[in-house]
Amino acid sequence: MGMVTDGKGTGKKAQVDNTNRLLTRSISESIQHAHSHNDGQAYQVIGTATLSSGTITAIHLKNTSTTLDIVVTYIRHQILDQSGGTAFPNASNYYRIALGRTYSSDGTAVTPVNLNTNSANEAEATVYNNSPTLAGTAQEIDRWYTKAEGDMNLFNKEGSIIIGQNGTLELSYIGDQSAGTIYTRLSFMMIPIN
């Protein structure tokens, strides 16, 4: 093995193998862990709502930051104790992820929790649960169908949903159930706008 000398004159050297690869040591970590650990900008919020026939929103989120994007990493939802509608699974009952609608009234304000207890950062977002009234047209980006009562439906977006300044996200249940509860958990990071 050969050696490469630092080009800045510090005298530091690095090993190079026979195929000209530099010997390195690295640590791999998830992007959410890195933002939580290094920047204190990973958050989680839980939303609930009582089921009734129609569209029920468990979480509505708006990015209020002028310097940070919201990057969605993970969503989980469960429906418990549902009754009065078509038995699961069926095409009439599903969970929807949508963009674009704005908060109008009702619901309950909830505060996202910073996942790094050493950080004093707070999410620059307004979040409502408990089926707030929303205005505008929902731009559906995904849906999935509940298989059974109590099923934990997991959705890993790995940062592909990005909510810019004043952008919104809603996590809703659409169906014909007349009773029950939907529980939704949303994990996200806040990262500098490029």
Image: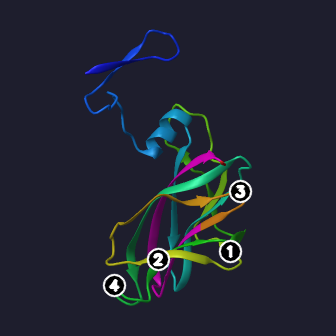
Q: Earlier in the sequence, mark 2 or mark 4?
A: 4
Circle 3 crowding by C-alpha within 10 Å: few under 14, some 14–19, many from 20: some
Where, quadrant-wise, is the N terminus in this rendering? top left
Real-space Cα distance between discs 4 and 1?
27 Å
Report the residue at 59% width, 47% height from top. Answer: 190
Circle 2 crowding by C-alpha within 10 Å: few under 14, some 14–19, many from 20: some
Residue type, label 4? Pro
Q: Earlier in the sequence, mark 4 or mark 3?
A: 4
Report the residue at 47% width, 88% height from top. Answer: 176
Which residue carries the number 3 mark?
165
Picture quadrant where residue 177 is located? bottom left
Which residue carries the number 4 mark?
89
- Secondary element at tag 4: loop
- x and y percentages locating residue 161 in the rendered image: 54, 62
Mark 2 or mark 1, whichever is nearer to me: 2
**Contact, CB < 8 Å: mark 3 with mark 2?**
no
- In the image, the segment drawn in magenta is 170-192
**Contact, CB < 8 Å: mark 3 with mark 1?**
no
Residue type, label 2? Arg
Which residue carries the number 1 mark?
134
- x and y percentages locating residue 169 in the rendered image: 60, 66
Which residue carries the number 2 mark?
143
